[in-house]
Image (cartoon, rainbow, N blue to C red):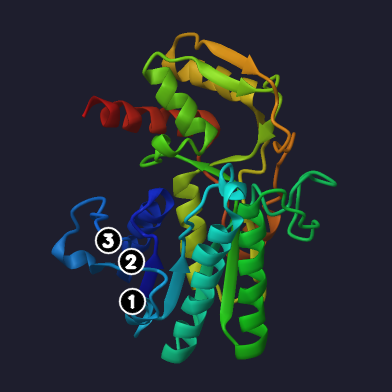
Amino acid sequence: MKIAIFGGGGFIGSAIVDRLLKDGNMLRVFERPRIEPFRTFAADEGVEWVTGDLMSMHDVSQVVDGVDVVLHLVSTTLPKSSNDDPIYDVQSNLVATLQMLNAMRAKGVPKIVFISSGGTVYGKPNYLPIDEAHPTEPQVSYGITKLAIEKYLLLYQYQYGLKVNILRVTNPYGERQRVETAQGAVGVFLSRALQGQSLDIWGDGSVTRDYIYVSDVAEAFARAVAYEGPKSVFNVSSGIGTSLNTLIENLETVLGRPIERRYLEKRPFDVPVSVLDNSLARQELGWQPTVGLLDGIRRTARWMEKALAK
């Protein structure tokens, strides 16, 4: 299968690239200019690395030409900063995605798999765990834009027959996570702890999230690429809630020493608890998470220690 991957050089995208290559797929990876491949690919791995502008219809049309599936992993904003400039969020993400969909229609590409945000599209939960039928009331522009993209994808599925799979991923962590963007508690906390710095906790540490290891996310995408069933939207999660205090205790276990922490006033936009039900993905995709939190932290710590030593 020939697959175009928008954002295939990033934290999650690189894990998906590695996973899809194991199935013998031919990959065309699209990244921003000056983004170098995350590793050296063997001659028989079948990776074409191209760069360009996501807002350029010409660039996007060339990338999707002749492929069987598109994976859309690009986001130009972060949840915590997206409210600062919602117009940019919409222009660079929603409008760019609509152009991508039109390019796919023009080139006859039959399927797209999109990464949505299980952590933001639902908002404050009405019940736990959150399933795909839960109301969507995002409280940040990032989640609103992700949800709008979802709706347009489903519109194109209904109107033009495009096969759409949307994966609402919770809180991914693991190797190649960009800690400098301060996104993801596991990566940020682990980086600071390894450098002997204290951790800032917003609130009393009871904020609870659903953390999932990046290789499990990549496996879900590999299953979605091959999926031909009737469902469109899937939660990709561990299904287990972990508070910030418990997360830090796990970090202390892995590092073998206490970590200094500083508690600050809670932030109004932090949802107290978010845990997603992954039973639909288990049933339809034949997928399940396999890496527990403690093991995932160990793997991430080993990678990060090497990265920080460079």
Kind of residue indicated by mark 3: Pro
Nearest the viewer among 85 and 206 is 85
Nearest the viewer among 172 and 53 is 53
- Please indicate, yes or no, whether residue 1 appears anywhere in the rendered image: no
Kind of residue indicated by mark 2: Phe
Task: Name the residue that disc number 3 marks.
Answer: 33
Kind of residue indicated by mark 1: Asp
Q: CA distance from mark 1 to mark 3?
A: 12 Å
Q: Are marks 2 and 1 in contact (CB under 8 Å)?
A: yes
Q: Which element is circle 1 on?
A: helix
Instruction: Report x, y in % for residue 247.
Output: 58, 25
Quadrant of residue 233 in the image? bottom right
Q: Which mark is residue 71?
A: none
Label 2 vs 1, first from the N-terminus? 2
Quadrant of residue 63 in the image? bottom left
Instruction: Report x, y in % for residue 125.
Output: 80, 45
**Residue that extends furthest to the right in the rendered view of this protein:** 126
Nearest the viewer among 27 and 204 is 204
Quadrant of residue 210 in the image? top right
Q: Which mark is residue 30?
A: 2
Image side of residue 156 versus residue 252, left or right = right
Q: Which element is circle 3 on?
A: loop
Quadrant showing the C terminus:
top left
Q: Are marks 2 and 3 in contact (CB under 8 Å)?
A: no
